[in-house]
Image (spheres, grey):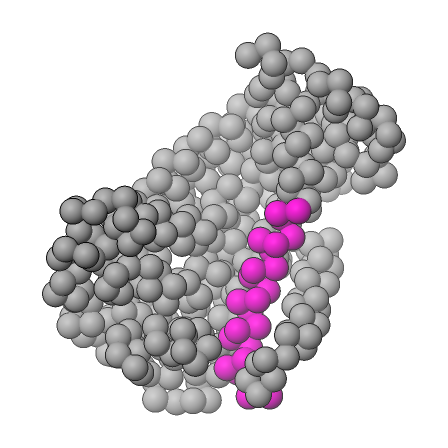
């Protein structure tokens, strides 16, 4: 453990050249007296909207395609991912309770391991990885706007236009981060809740068909993804579980968003653990309800199934296709697609709220540019 406690000479040299002060553990975890503190409701909603945005309504076709043959049996790997993330939420809850404050992983590496080097390296790799993760949400919003606005469908191959729209989303989200965090979070949560309730109620009551949930008859036969004969083949059980769990973990990402902004909450030692565990448990169950509702109401196989439409026709807006199927109204489906786009935007906003604190927290600890 000694190597985690010593300050690496290379880190100090880089810090000095970048005009970064030496690392310190004396950062105050409290905010200014006039700043309004958030409660458990805002913390839970922030985690929840971060998780649900780019989840089932974007990744469902890719999840089913991860198996050979493709089908609902992919939910086995997805369930493993949800369980793993629920266990991981207890780790984030413990860290948030023991080391309340802002900065997330950067904060914990510095205080739990007393390792400025590890914290420093995390911040700089985050500068590369963080924006890509946020951008993936804006791409999902554009996908649903393509359904709402036919002009975007005609310009589907023009990546420059999509890039401009994504940049506009990023600008708006960055502005909202500094506006009114509590109201924006609750508003985004209300839109997400409306989308979830509509899908679950209509999916289980209007167009529900058990036959759509049946896996192909040869889903566990030799040569299939869930066959135990070739565990380590490229389409064998181990790699199939890895592919499906990767999608599940991507969908579940966000139950730790509150850990990045711990300083903005009234009682972080209590609120952070509760928000982490509750959001991971409830949203994991909501995911399965949404998946089952969509799969039972919307045909997924065949040339006209939503999996084929996503892979061959570039029509991955599953939520809009679902709304069109259950209501038989193209106009309502367009309005619903707009709500889904706002839901995904809210997810990216919540992610940006958390990630924006990492460089600032690192700067206070002397591990990033001082002017932040």
**Quadrant location of the C terminus?**
top right
Tell me: 243 left or right of 205: right
Q: Is residue 174 above or below residue 342?
A: above
Quarter-of-image position of residue 327 = bottom left
For the point 75% across and 18% down, the residue is: 9
For the point 65% across and 52% down, the residue is: 131
**Closer to us: 38 or 348:** 348
- The overriding secondary structure of the stretch rendered in magenta is helix
Asked whether 140 falls inside the magenta stretch, the response is yes
> Does the rendering let one see residue 59?
yes
Asked whether 88 falls inside the magenta stretch, the response is no
**Quadrant location of the N terminus?**
top right
For the record, the magenta segment spans 128-151
Tell me: 61 left or right of 192: left
For the point 44% across and 74% down, the residue is: 317
Most distant residue in the top direction: 2
- Residue 106 percent across, percent down from the top left: 63, 32
Q: Is residue 108 above or below residue 372?
A: above
Q: Is residue 253 above or below residue 56?
A: above
> Does the rendering let one see residue 267?
no
Tell me: 44 left or right of 355: left
- Residue 312 percent across, percent down from the top left: 41, 78
- Residue 315 percent across, percent down from the top left: 44, 78
- Residue 72 percent across, percent down from the top left: 24, 62
For the point 57% across and 81% down, the residue is: 156
Number of numbered discs visible in the structure rendering: 0
């Amino acid at each position: 453990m000694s190597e985690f406690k010593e300050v690496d000479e290379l880190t100090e040299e880089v810090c000095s050249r970048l005009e970064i002060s030496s690392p310190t553990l004396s950062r105050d975890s409290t905010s200014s007296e006039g700043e309004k503190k958030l409660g458990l409701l805002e913390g839970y909603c922030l985690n929840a909207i971060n998780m649900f945005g780019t989840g089932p309504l974007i990744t469902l076709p890719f999840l089913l395609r991860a198996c050979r043959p493709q089908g609902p049996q992919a939910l086995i790997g997805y369930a493993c991912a949800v369980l793993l993330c629920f266990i991981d939420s207890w780790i984030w809850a413990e860290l948030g309770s023991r080391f309340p404050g802002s900065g997330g992983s950067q904060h914990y590496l510095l205080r739990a391991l007393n390792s400025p080097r590890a914290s420093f390296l995390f911040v700089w790799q985050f500068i590369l990885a963080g924006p890509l993760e946020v951008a993936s949400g804006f791409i999902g919003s554009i996908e649903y706007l393509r359904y709402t606005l036919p002009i975007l469908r005609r310009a589907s191959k023009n990546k420059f236009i999509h890039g401009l729209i994504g940049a506009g989303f990023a600008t708006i989200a960055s502005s909202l981060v500094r506006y009114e965090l509590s109201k924006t979070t609750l508003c985004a949560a209300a839109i997400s809740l409306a989308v979830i309730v509509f899908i679950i109620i209509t999916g289980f009551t209007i167009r529900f068909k058990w036959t759509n949930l049946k896996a192909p008859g040869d889903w566990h036969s030799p040569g299939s993804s869930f066959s135990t004969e070739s565990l380590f083949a490229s389409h064998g059980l181990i790699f199939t579980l890895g592919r499906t769990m990767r999608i599940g973990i991507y969908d579940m990402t966000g139950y730790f968003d509150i850990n990045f902004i711990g300083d903005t909450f009234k009682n972080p030692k209590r609120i952070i653990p509760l928000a982490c565990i509750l959001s991971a448990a409830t949203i994991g169950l909501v995911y399965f309800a949404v998946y089952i509702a969509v799969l039972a109401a919307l045909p997924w196989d065949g040339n006209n199934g939503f999996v084929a439409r996503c892979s061959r026709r570039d029509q991955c807006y599953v939520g809009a296709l679902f709304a069109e199927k259950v209501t038989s109204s193209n106009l309502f489906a367009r309005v619903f697609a707009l709500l889904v786009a706002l839901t995904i935007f809210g997810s990216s906003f919540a992610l940006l709220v958390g990630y924006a604190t990492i460089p600032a927290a690192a700067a206070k600890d002397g591990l990033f540019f001082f002017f932040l």
